[in-house]
Image (cartoon, rainbow, N blue to C red):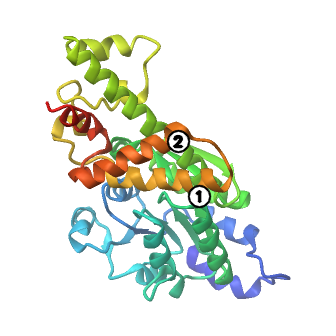
Amino acid sequence: MAAMLRGSWSLVGRSCKHVDFAFVSTRSMASKTPVGFVGLGNMGNPMAKNLLKHGYPVIATDVFPESCKEVQELGAQIVDNPADVADKADRIITMLPSSPNVIDVYTGLNGILKKVKKGSLLIDSSTIDPAVSKEMAAAAEKTGAVFMDAPVSGGVGAASSGKLTFMVGGAEEEFTAAKELLTCMGANVVYCGQVGTGQAAKICNNMLLAIGMIGTSETMNLGVRLGLDPKLLAQILNMSSGRCWSSDTYNPVPGVMEGVPSGNNYQGGFGTQLMAKDLGLAQNTATNTKTPVPLGSLAHQIYRIMCARGYANKDFSSVFQFLREEEGQ
């Protein structure tokens, strides 16, 4: 079906430079055609696996070849670079660490836009500057493709279980086609508005997440110093008004919960360096919009200090360990 649609593109007239969204949206009929995936890190790997579980052929690549091994063993086709992905799939998802990575993957020498087909749907689930999402959308439009930003919330656990939340920005006409794929990887897929609004929602969420994690870590540390058992304190918090995601789902204290980074020496999960990056994005947008964010600013500085103190590659919940070490424990 996808091949038939691409073949019929030349028969579809367009009276202006904008992409014919009505035409592109018919991709939702081509349910099990190949899906491209670029970026198989901590988040991208389980996301691609869930696409495979739902019966989608996956064509993938990653800058680190060893990251491709697991999905290749599950049946994914591995290619050399993003351009090769675009050559073989007209629906592509990218999950990358930062704005420069996204720019390179889409517009670089071997970028997606070098070989992208007209009518392709490009969904970026990275967390980046909303302005970069808008730039990529404009560049994609020139090739006849559609770009949507769809950053995620939920962490590695939700990525593995297929329970991510996607915040989607882009042409509303394309939301149904995007949602078809995103529901394979997430429990919530929310349309936020035009390109960049998904990133705006994600940046706001992560600023609150960082503030909440620091607050939870400070609270748990204080309770431990006061002689409370950390499991008991967590139990009390989680049945009281102080309950939050950082306390009941992702507790930062080793031994309180199983299956979270704090129980694995803060390995895996969402890196401190990435949190610092996201908080930097929040600071930039706050400055541009003249929005006061004093707690967000402080959280940014704390995570930047942590990166300088050797925590960059540890999960962001390691702020608890950072606070303990700061007090000499």
In the rendered view, does 242 fall on the left or right side of 310? Answer: right
The residue that disc 1 covers is 178
Q: Is residue 138 at least partly visible in the picture? A: yes
Element type at mark 2: helix
Element type at mark 1: helix
**Quadrant of res 82:** bottom left
The residue that disc 2 covers is 205
Note whether 213 is above or below 35 in the view shown.
above
Note whether 64 is above or below 41 in the view shown.
below
Mark 1 to mark 2: distance in Å? 21 Å
Residue 185 percent location from the top left of the image: 44, 49
Q: Quadrant of the N terminus?
A: bottom right
Type of amino acid at the residue the image marks with label 1: Ala
What residue occupies the far front of the structure in this picture? Answer: 327
Q: Quadrant of the C terminus?
A: top left
Q: Which mark is residue 154?
A: none
